[in-house]
Image: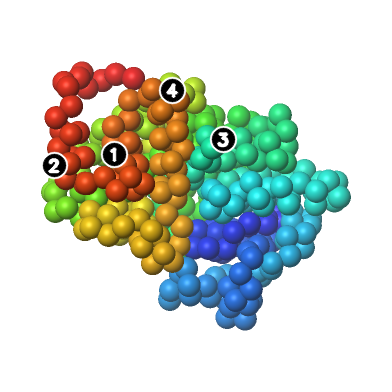
């Protein structure tokens, strides 16, 4: 039996933790909200994040980080991007004290503003310096709500170490979630992160009343932007973005009401302000953070990402949505296929 500490007990962390326990693993959830931990321990529910759903009854929750990771073979990070570095800094001295080196798996999809680093870079820096082989990223078209209902789902697990990717594949797979391995850790992370920005744009179009043609164009050109950033700046493999963590995740996030990023975009399109949306969402809107990091990269490296830049201006410069759409459609002609 593999002991797994899930760091982050929001919707995705709770669902993954429960699924891993269903798969026969020894799982503990870590979170810093006492009321959530108490509800999980007493009622096996997490109603703030997942209504009308029960966790595996063998999954406890704790706010004691050392208790959670003691004896763990694998640490699964399912935290907001802004919290990953903070928690990683706290994990490092505990692992040093315990003398253990568990495998690190990230299900967080984001890029850190300021540093412009991916989650694997943060975990490597803070916990395993110069040892990316100990990091695995999981990403793909997967909403917590659907996995909780055991909908059929396919996800990629990526690592620079094939054996570690295969280990995660074995531990996480079951009869309703199928995991594929991938050696492009960077590409998988970029796809998972930047699709949240494009999902905000997709929601904006719906909020403005645009139809299927507009949505299809947005997703296709959004994928071109994700690929361009991944290949030109991060050195990812172009073919990764035609897979589950690229086009797969993009499709589900740009078309589903389960996507917080899509819902945030829809409300932006309807005229609400980002601050109000984030306050009332109740959960993190990762795309609103990632778009800051993407904007910094665009400015620094002069990467052509007009959709992402328009989302940034709408979110943080109070730009008019209709004017942004007008300017985008009036851009100078360009060939379709290019980096």
- Residue pointed to by mark 1: 310
- Residue pointed to by mark 4: 301
Task: Name the mark on residue 213.
Answer: 2
The answer to whether one can see residue 307 in this image is: yes
Q: Is residue 119 above or below residue 32?
A: above
What crowding class fits label 2: few (fewer than 14 Cα within 10 Å), some (14-19), or many (20 or more)? few
Q: Secondary structure at mark 1?
A: helix
Measure the alpha-carbon separation of dots 4 and 2. 31 Å
First reached walking from the N terminus: tag 4 or tag 3: 3
- Contact (CB < 8 A) between labels 1 and 3? no
The residue under the point 58% across, 46% down is 106
Measure the alpha-carbon separation of dots 1 and 3. 22 Å
First reached walking from the N terminus: tag 4 or tag 2: 2
Foreground mark, 1 or 2? 1
Foreground mark, 4 or 2? 4
What crowding class fits label 3: few (fewer than 14 Cα within 10 Å), some (14-19), or many (20 or more)? few
First reached walking from the N terminus: tag 4 or tag 1: 4
Depth check: give the residue in front, 284 or 259.
284
Depth check: give the residue in front, 197 or 162.
197
The residue under the point 53% across, 75% down is 45
Q: Is residue 60 above or below residue 101?
A: below
Pick the quarter of the image with the N terminus.
bottom right
Task: Name the mark on residue 115.
Answer: 3
Measure the alpha-carbon separation of dots 2 and 3. 36 Å
Depth check: give the residue in front, 198 or 294.
294
């Amino acid at each position: 039996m593999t002991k797994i500490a899930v760091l982050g007990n929001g919707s995705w962390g709770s669902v993954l933790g429960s699924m891993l326990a269903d798969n026969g693993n020894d799982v503990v959830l870590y979170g810093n909200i006492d009321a959530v931990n108490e509800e999980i321990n007493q009622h096996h529910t997490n109603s703030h994040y997942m209504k009308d759903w029960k966790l595996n009854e063998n999954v406890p929750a704790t706010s004691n980080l050392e208790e959670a990771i003691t004896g763990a073979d694998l640490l699964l990070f399912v935290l907001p991007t802004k919290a990953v570095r903070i928690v990683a800094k706290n994990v490092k001295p505990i692992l040093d004290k315990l003398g253990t080196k568990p495998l690190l798996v990230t299900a967080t999809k984001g890029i850190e503003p300021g540093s412009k680093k991916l989650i694997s870079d943060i975990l490597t820096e803070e916990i395993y310096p110069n040892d990316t082989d100990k990091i695995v990223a999981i990403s793909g078209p997967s909403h917590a709500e659907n996995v909780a209902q055991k909908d059929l789902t396919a996800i990629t697990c990526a690592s620079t170490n094939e054996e570690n990717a295969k280990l995660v594949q074995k531990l996480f797979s079951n009869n309703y979630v199928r995991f594929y391995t991938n050696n492009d850790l960077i590409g998988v992370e970029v796809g998972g992160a930047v699709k949240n920005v494009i999902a905000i744009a997709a929601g904006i179009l719906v909020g403005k009343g645009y139809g299927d043609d507009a949505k299809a164009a947005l997703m296709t050109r959004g994928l071109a932007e994700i690929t361009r950033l991944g290949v030109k700046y991060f050195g990812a493999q172009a073919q990764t973005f035609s897979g589950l963590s690229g086009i797969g995740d993009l499709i589900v996030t740009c078309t589903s009401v389960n996507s917080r990023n899509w819902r945030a975009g829809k409300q932006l399109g309807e005229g609400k302000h980002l601050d109000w949306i984030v306050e009332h969402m109740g959960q993190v809107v990762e795309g609103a953070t990632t778009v800051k990091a993407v904007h910094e990269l665009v400015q620094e490296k002069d990467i052509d990402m007009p959709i992402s830049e328009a989302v940034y201006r709408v979110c943080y410069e109070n730009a008019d949505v209709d004017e942004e759409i007008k300017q985008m459609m009036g851009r100078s002609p360009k060939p379709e296929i290019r980096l």
